[in-house]
Image: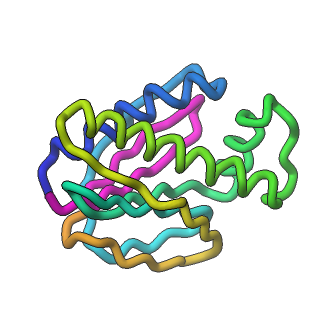
């Protein structure tokens, strides 16, 4: 996978999160994973089609997902990961990926995205659409956020 495909996702995080009330945005690191992703917590997957194809999977712990939902809902306490909280973090995945699609467009690459699919639980296994997956770890107000990108150019 060409590393240039990760920049739109990093840019999207730095562009979208401040609009939602997150002030301290940090890039924590990048690592390489294989195509069998296993995660515990909240997982949001979005498909990418067009000139490049693949998927992006966002991973958060359940508590961090509730904290993000709370910030997105203007500080309203989120005690349970209910429909409202699920809707908020799904919309975040949609906003991040749509914003990344805009950055791809600025690079001259046309892509469309699918509706996010939200899954949560323990040891959830996801088969990524490319053999190599680039994992970008970022944080928003100290909340760790993992973006797993699998794109075939």
Left or right: residue 3 versus residue 94 is: left
84 drawn magenta: no
Q: Nearer the viewer, residue 76 or 40?
A: 76
Q: Please identify the quadrant where the N terminus is shown.
A: bottom left
x then y, percent, for residue 125: 46, 79
Left or right: residue 110 versus residue 80 is: left
Identify which residue is drawn at 48% across, 63% down. Answer: 45
Quarter holding residue 141: top right
Q: Is residue 64 above or below residue 19?
A: below
Give the residues drawn in magenta, as a range: 134-153
Quarter holding residue 67: top right
Q: How is the image coloured?
A: rainbow
Q: Nearer the viewer, residue 79 or 91?
A: 91
Identify which residue is drawn at 36% across, 57% down. Answer: 148
Q: Residue furthest top?
A: 23
Identify which residue is drawn at 53% across, 49% down. Answer: 94
Left or right: residue 22 versus residue 102 is: right
**Helix, strand or loop for the magenta stretch, by majority:** strand
């Amino acid at each position: 996978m060409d590393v240039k495909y990760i920049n739109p996702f990093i840019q999207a995080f730095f562009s979208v999160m401040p609009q939602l009330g997150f002030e301290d945005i940090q890039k924590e690191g990048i690592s390489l994973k294989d195509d069998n992703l296993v995660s515990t917590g909240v997982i949001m997957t979005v498909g990418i089609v067009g000139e490049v194809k693949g998927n992006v999977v966002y991973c958060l712990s359940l508590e961090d997902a509730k904290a993000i939902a709370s910030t997105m809902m203007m500080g309203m306490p989120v005690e349970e990961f209910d429909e409202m909280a699920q809707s908020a973090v799904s919309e975040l995945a949609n906003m991040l990926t749509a914003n990344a699609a805009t950055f791809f467009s600025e690079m001259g690459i046309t892509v469309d995205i699918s509706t996010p699919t939200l899954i949560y639980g323990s040891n959830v296994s996801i088969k990524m659409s490319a053999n190599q997956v680039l994992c970008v770890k970022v944080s928003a107000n100290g909340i760790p956020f993992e973006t797993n990108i699998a794109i075939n150019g």
